[in-house]
Image: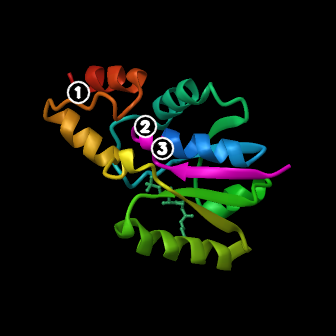
Amino acid sequence: MRSAVCPGSFDPVTNGHIDIIGRAAALFDHVTVGVLVNQTKSSLFTVDERIVMLEEVCAVYPNVTVQSFTGLLVDFCRDHKISAIVKGLRAVTDFDYELQMAQMNNRLTGIETLFVSTNPVYGYLSSSLVKEIAGHGGDVTGLVPDSVLKSLKERLA
Ligand code: PNS
């Protein structure tokens, strides 16, 4: 069975993330959405809240599950017999850091990283911008799933 991970912070999940997860689900037998538990980074939503939101929006993909992880991504992949990392690339600005991580992860365990080109519709989209805009009362409809939009409004009210 071919398994992949779509890793990230997902604080919160955006429609850009969902596009990448869905396309990974079409390529692999099983996809794990790996939510990083990062104690040093302040977040709007707890890891558990992010998992609930992800599980709801990923329910349409029967071969996708959601799980948190701590520590190195390559260790999580080894422990769960995951042979590939799938990442979305939005623009050249993503490329340097993503390439560096892909090469380092490959050096650590030989795991491969596959880059999926982000749908141009979501090329400018990030969780950070969504939080900033929503935090100032801006409209992020269409950039995040409706359920996430509701959670954002409640959290930022
Ligand atoms: O959504 P993000 O915050 O851009 O995701 C970054 C993430 C989680 C993919 C990356 O930080 C990661 O893989 N962290 C796990 C720790 C790790 O393995 N670090 C070494 C990378 S070479």
Q: Which residues are magenta?
A: 1-17
Q: What residue sits 53% from the left and 27% below the top?
A: 57
In this view, 127 is above or below 136: below
Q: CA distance from mark 2 to mark 3?
A: 5 Å
Label placed on residue 61? none
- State yes or no: Cβ of the residue under disc 3 lies below 8 Å from any atom of ligand 1: no
> Which mark is in front, 3 or 1?
3
Q: What residue sits 43% from the left and 43% below the top?
A: 16
The reply to whether discs 3 and 1 touch (Cβ–Cβ < 8 Å) is no
Q: CA distance from mark 3 to mark 1?
A: 21 Å
Identify which amino acid the numbered label 1 is placed on: Leu
Identify which amino acid the numbered label 3 is placed on: His
Q: Identify residue for label 1.
A: 156
* Residue 80 visible, this orientation: no
Label placed on residue 17? 3
- Pointer 1: residues within 10 angstroms few (<14), some, or many (20+)? few
Residue 150 figure quarter: top left
Q: Identify residue for label 2.
A: 15
| Secondary structure of the residue carrying numbered label 3 | helix
Which x, y percent locates residue 106? 66, 75
The reply to whether discs 2 and 3 touch (Cβ–Cβ < 8 Å) is yes
Residue 136 figure quarter: top left
Which of 45 and 127 lies nearest the eye of the viewer? 127
Which x, y percent locates residue 76? 68, 55
